[in-house]
Image (cartoon, rainbow, N blue to C red):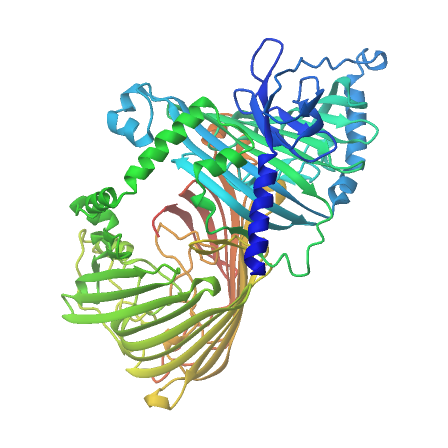
Amino acid sequence: MKAPLLFAFFIAATLQVCAQTYRLSGKIVDEKRNPVSFASVYIRNTTYGTTANEDGFYEFKLTPGTYNVVFRYVGNLERTEKITVTSHDEELNMTLANEPFALQAETGTGDEKDAGDDIISKVIDKREYYLKQVNEYSCVVFVKGVQRLTKAPQNLMTRDVRRMLQLDVNGRGILYQSESLSKYNFKNPDYVKEEMIASKTAGQNTAFSYNKASDLQVNFYKNNFDIEGLSGRAFVSPFASNAQRFYNYKLVGRSVKSGRRIAKIQVIPKRKNEAVYQGNVYVVEGDWRIYGVDLNLTKEQANINLVDTLNISQQYIPINDSVWLPTSTLFDFHGDVLGFKFKGYYLAIYNNYNVNPSFPKGFFNGEVMRVDTQASAKNGRYWANNRPVPLTTLEERDYKKKDSIFAIQNTPEYLDSLNKSRNGFSPLSYLIFGYQNYNREKRQSFYLEPFLQTVFYNTVEGWGINAKVHYIKGFDNGQSFSVTPELRYGFAAKMFNANVGFTYNYNPSTQSVLSARFGSDVLDLNNAGTRSLLFNTLSSLLYENNYIKLYRTHFGVVAWQHELTNGLLLNTQVSYAERQQLYNTSFNHIFDNKNKQYTANNPLANPPTVESMLFPTNQALTAKASLTYTFRQQYVVRPDGKYFEPSLYPKIRLNYRKGINGVLGSDVNYDFASLDVFDDRMKIGLIGFSAFKITAGTFLNRKSLYFMDYNHFFGNQGTTFNPTIGSFHFLPFYEFSTNRSFIEAHYEHNFAGNFLSKIPLVRKLKLEELIGVNYLAQGKNSTPISNTGLMQPVKGSYTEAYIGIQRFIFRVDYGIAFDGNRKAIQGIRIFYGIR
C-alpha cells in the first residue's frame, strides 16, 4: 500500500502547488502606444522569464509573493516594477520609452569611431574567457516559429492554391506554426543533449525551419557562426578575434541600466558582400561583456539564400554575480520569391538555468536529441498552461482552424479517400516518376520504377525491359521488410534474367539489416559505377558510344549489417556466382556516323571493335567485410526511429574481400584490402566547405581472379557526370582497373559564393564557385588476366583538376585530365540532378 499512498500524496501536493500559481500578464507598448514585439520580461535575480508576442502581450505564472519584474528590449529604456501576487491573477501593462543613448563630452567631438573600436577591443580581449567561463549548463528552452504569406500574385492565387495553403481570398495567412519545449544540456566545447518534451506544428513549412533548441544556439563569443539553410559559409561575429579586419565600430552612446553602464555600438562592414553583419551591439562596460545584439543580414550585403533580410536579436541576463547567459534569441525574416512575399520569425526563450548540473560520466553519448514518445500528443490545455509566449489572435485562430482540418483529415474515411486518390494511375507520372500504391491500414507500399528506367538499349542485349518492383511492409516498432523482384529481357540476345531480393530491417536503433538476393542478372564489369541504363541508352543510340561493358551472372548473396557500438558499423556479405562473358548482338543507332563503330564488349579488346575473350565462364565464392567508424557520431532518437546527424569529423572505413578457392567449385583465390578516409562536408569557416576522400588498397594475394574481381574506379565518359565525392570527371571506366596496389585521392572545395558574390549582376545569381582535384596512382607491374593471356595496360599516375559553378542541383565544371605527364583530355562536364 505504500506505493499507492505515496503516489496519491504526490498528486495531491502537485495539485496544491498548481492551485497556488497565478498569472501575471499585460501589454508592453512604446511611447507612441505601438506594441513592443518580443520584449523580454523576467524576474530579477532569477533565470525565470518570458517574452512578449508580436502584439506586445506577455504572460507567465507566479506563486504568491513579491517580485521585481524587469521589462527589457534593445533600444528601449529598461524598467523594473515591484509587484505582489496574492490570491488572484495580476495585470501589469508597461510602457517602454525609447532609450536616449547619449554621448559623453569626451566622445562628442568626432572620436566616436575610436571610442567604439576601443570598447570592442576590450570585449575581444575577454572573448575567450567568456566563451569558456561556463563549462556546462542546463536550461529549459521554448522555441516558437511562424511563417506568414503577406502578398501573392493574384493570377496564381486560384481557389485550389488558397485551399491547399489555407489562405484568405487575398492570398494572405499563416503558412506554418511550430512550438517546442525542451530541456537543453550543454558542456564545453560542443557537447549537446536535448530532450524534447512537447512539440506542435501546423501548416506547411515552405522556407526553412528551426524547431528545436539546438537550432537557435547563437553564441557571438565564437569567432564564426553558421546559419544552416541560408548560406554555405559562416559569418564573422562582431566580437571575433579578427573582427576588426571586417568591421568598423562607432559609439552611438551610453546609458545606465540597473547600475551598469551600457554602450551602444554601431557595427559597420568595412567592405560590401562579405560574410558579415550590420546593426548594433550593446556592451556592459567594465565587465566588457555582451549585453545584447541587434544585427541583420541582407541578400544584397551577405548574399544569403531564401530570404531577403534576416534580423538576429539576442539579450543576455545575469545568472549570478559573474555569469551572464542569453534569455532570448530571435530570428526575424522576410523575403520575396517570384512575387510571393512572406515574413516570419523563430524565437527561443531560455529559462531555469543551472550552471552546475554535474552531468554524470557518459551523459553525452552521441545522442544529441531525444523526442519524447508523447511529445506531439500534448493537447490544447497542456500548451495553454506551459506556453510562455501567448498566442496572438491570428495565431490562435489559425491553430483552431488547422486543428479542425487536421482532425477531419485524419479520420479513417478521409484518409481512405486520400489514399485512393493518390493511388490512382497516371501514365505521364509513371513515365517519369514511376507508380506507387500505398495501403495505410496495412502499412505497406508497392512501387514500380519509372518507364524511362525500365526500357533500355545496349549492344549486348539490344532493346530490353528491366522491370523492377519494390514491396515494403512497415511495423509499429520501426522494423520493416521489403521484397524487390526484378525481371530483365534483352530482345536481340533473347536472354531472360530474373532475381529477387529480400531486406529485413530488424533493429533500426542499431542499423541492423539482414538481406539476401538470388537469381540471374546482367551486371557491369565495373562495380564502382559507370552510367545508368537511361544514359547508356542515349549515348549508344545517339552517338554510338556503348560505354558500359556487361557480363551475365547466376548468383546468390547474403548480407548482414549491424552497429557494434555508436559510430562503428559492420557490414558483411557472402556471395556465390557463376560469371559468363557476353558479346555484342545489336548495332542499332539513330544517326549513322560512318567514321565511328561500336566497340567490343571486351574493354581490353585490341583492336577495340573486334570481340575477343576476356574471361572464361567461372565460379566465385566471395566473402566481404567492412568496418566504418564515424568519430563522435551524433544521432536523434524520435518515436519513429533513430536518425543520424551529419558528422563533424571524417569517417574511416576498412574493407576486406576474400576470393575463396575450391569450395563449391570456386575458381577464385585472392585477398584484397583497402582503407578509406572521407568527409562529405567539412566546414572551413568563412571560405565555405570542403569534401575529400582518400583510398589506398592492395591485393595481398592474386593467385586467381578475373576482371570483375579487380578494383575498379568511379570513372566517367560523356558530358554528364556524377558530382559525388570519390568520382572522376574524365577517367575511362575500365582502362585503369587494377589487380595491383593503388592510391586514389579526391578533394573539392566549395567557396559558397565568396568571390562571385563580389561581382555586380553575377551576384544576383547566387552562384557557388568550386575547385577540385582527383588523383590516381597504381603499381606499375601487371599480371595476366586469368586464362586469357590478355594484359591489363600498365598505368602510372592519373590527375584531374577542375573548376565549376553551381546553383542548387545545377552544376557546370571545366576540367583537364593528365595521364602521367601527358594531357589526356579537357572539357566541360554538367550535372542537372539526374545520376
Q: Is residue 553 left or right of residue 123?
A: left
Compare residues 149 and 168 and report the one nearer the observer. Answer: 168
Image quadrant in which you'd find residue 17: top right
The residue most toward the right is 106
Question: In terms of image quadrants, where is residue 295?
Answer: top right
Give left or right: position of 506 versus 1.
left
Residue 39 horizontal/vertical position (percent): 61, 23
Q: Position of residue 332 (x, y in %)?
A: 54, 27
Q: Nearer the viewer, residue 147 or 208?
A: 147
Q: Residue furthest front?
A: 1
Q: Is residue 15 left or right of residue 265?
A: left
Report if residue 633 is visible in the image: no
- Residue furthest top in the image: 32
Q: From the viewer's perspective, is 578 left or right of 1?
A: left
Q: Nearer the viewer, residue 785 or 389?
A: 389
The front one of 17 and 153 is: 17
Q: Residue 68: x and y, percent?
A: 72, 25
Say whether residue 604 is visible.
yes
Does residue 201 sit above or below 701 in this rendering?
above
Residue 237: image x %, image y %?
67, 34
Q: Residue at x 53, y 37 (%)?
A: 231
Query: Where the N terminus falls, by quadrant?
Result: bottom right
How many numbered tags mark residues here? 0
Residue drawn at x 23%, y 43% as measured from the top left: 418
